[in-house]
């Protein structure tokens, strides 16, 4: 029974890694679509999001089946419950990536953000992609050093998010209302994407070390 | 054992109702703070949010204890797993209510939105409050008619959310960039609040009827 359980836990972990990989591909394409006004890339992201949704639903069903059959307790139980939470955050990250792509598609053939903000969004996008890749590695390796790195990168995303508002509300801003709306939403999506990664990283860190930070709940 | 389990499930349900009540109070105060520029009300919401967070953490711990001790299967197991998901959405609704209050506080003594949008936000706020109250009743009574009503009200919130963009991007819009940013964020927060209520309503409906709509996952 114990051995079956360990196998099933590995299956859960493998599937979480697979979903995280899909999310990493999604955000990579979404931020390129956004920064380069590549509408066909944006449409790919939108078309592929249901795959992430389906994979998370299937993972949730597997986790519930494991709870029913193996009736885990203590740390084993917390691993399975955490898998359900991680799955929910990954699903949401896919949605945010889709929202970023939708902005690129709506605005095509124009770019979503005016010149003065492009380097900021390029940086935010690159950080989101790096965070997603590190999250995949973290889920695979449980190397808690990566959780620390994700937190640091999230701090950078937060600072860039605030700097978007500084620019939009500054005297030099010449954007129209549509530019202001798009910059606000896009910045929020990039920032929430990183937040979800931090929440997942905290859960993995907790599972690996037993050091529970309740704010990750 | 079975009787203990039923008692524990009632305890889970009672706590979810209590948290939903806190969220309903929070969004009622937040939308009044927002629409009437009432900074002390805004500060109340912000100060009380940790209570919602703590209540959801405690509920999660109870749910995990029940999983470990009672080892439920089938429908009972799904009830406990759904409680964890509902708890996560309620916690997030409290956050969104806090974000709405923060906008009111930042902008005080000014109102957050210009005159042309006030009736729209008054309507969105009233709908969010009604949705939160119905959600509390739904969690208490499992009357699935309420789930249907929440969905209909969410459709109205979505329509109002789109109408905010129509106004902000319309020719008559005279708002400054700060008004545009605030209207965009505020509208998004109101809309997400209602989305979470719909996700919870779908879960309750599923548990009550066995009719699973996977998009609620």
Image: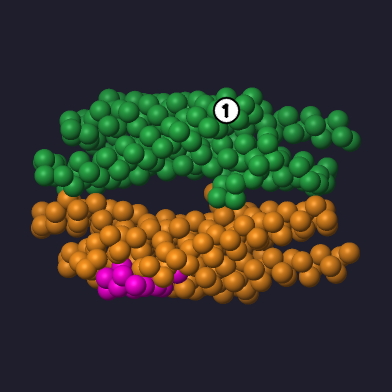
Chain colours: A green, B orange
Say which quadrant the N terminus of chain B sits in: bottom right
Q: Give the range drawn in magenta.
A: B26-41
**Quarter holding residue B10:** bottom right
In the picture, measured across the screen, residue A126 lies left or right of residue B58, that is left
Q: Is residue B215 above or below residue A107?
A: below
Q: Which residue is located at x 48 percent, y 63 percent?
A: B49
What residue lies at 42% left-to-right and 56% top-to-bottom?
B192
Q: Position of residue B96 (x, y in %)?
A: 42, 58
Residue B12 is drawn in which quadrant?
bottom right
Q: In this orientation, does residue A102 appear?
A: no
Let me know if residue B118 is in the magenta part.
no
The answer to whether residue B193 is seen in the rendering is: yes
Q: What secondary structure is marked by label 1?
A: helix
Task: Provide the chain ID for the residue under circle 1.
Answer: A
Disc 1 residue crowd, few under 14, some 14–19, many 20+, Cα 10 Å = few
Q: Mark 1 points at which residue?
A: A145
Q: Is residue A108 above or below residue A175?
A: above
Q: In this view, does A24 lie to the left or right of A78?
A: left
Is residue B26 shown left or right of residue A54?
Answer: left
Q: Answer whether residue B37 is magenta in the image.
A: yes
């Amino acid at each position: 029974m114990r051995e079956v359980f360990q196998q099933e836990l590995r299956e859960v972990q493998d599937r979480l890694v697979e979903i995280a990989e899909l999310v990493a591909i999604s955000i990579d394409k979404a931020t390129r679509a956004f920064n380069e006004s590549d509408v066909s890339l944006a449409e790919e992201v939108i078309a592929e999001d249901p795959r992430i949704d389906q994979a998370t639903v299937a993972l949730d069903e597997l986790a519930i089946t494991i709870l029913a059959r193996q009736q885990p307790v203590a740390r084993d139980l917390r691993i399975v419950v955490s898998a359900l939470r991680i799955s929910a955050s990954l699903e949401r990250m896919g949605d945010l990536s889709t929202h970023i792509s939708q902005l690129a598609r709506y605005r095509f053939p124009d770019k979503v953000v005016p010149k003065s903000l492009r380097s900021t969004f390029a940086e935010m996008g690159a950080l989101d992609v790096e965070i997603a890749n590190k999250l995949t590695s973290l889920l695979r390796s449980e190397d808690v050093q990566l959780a620390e790195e994700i937190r640091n990168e999230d701090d950078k995303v937060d600072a860039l998010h605030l700097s978007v508002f500084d620019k939009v509300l500054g005297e030099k801003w010449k954007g129209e209302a549509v530019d202001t709306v798009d910059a606000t939403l896009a910045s929020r999506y990039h920032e929430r994407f990183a937040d979800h990664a931090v929440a997942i990283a905290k859960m993995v860190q907790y599972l690996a070390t037993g050091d529970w930070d309740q704010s990750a709940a």
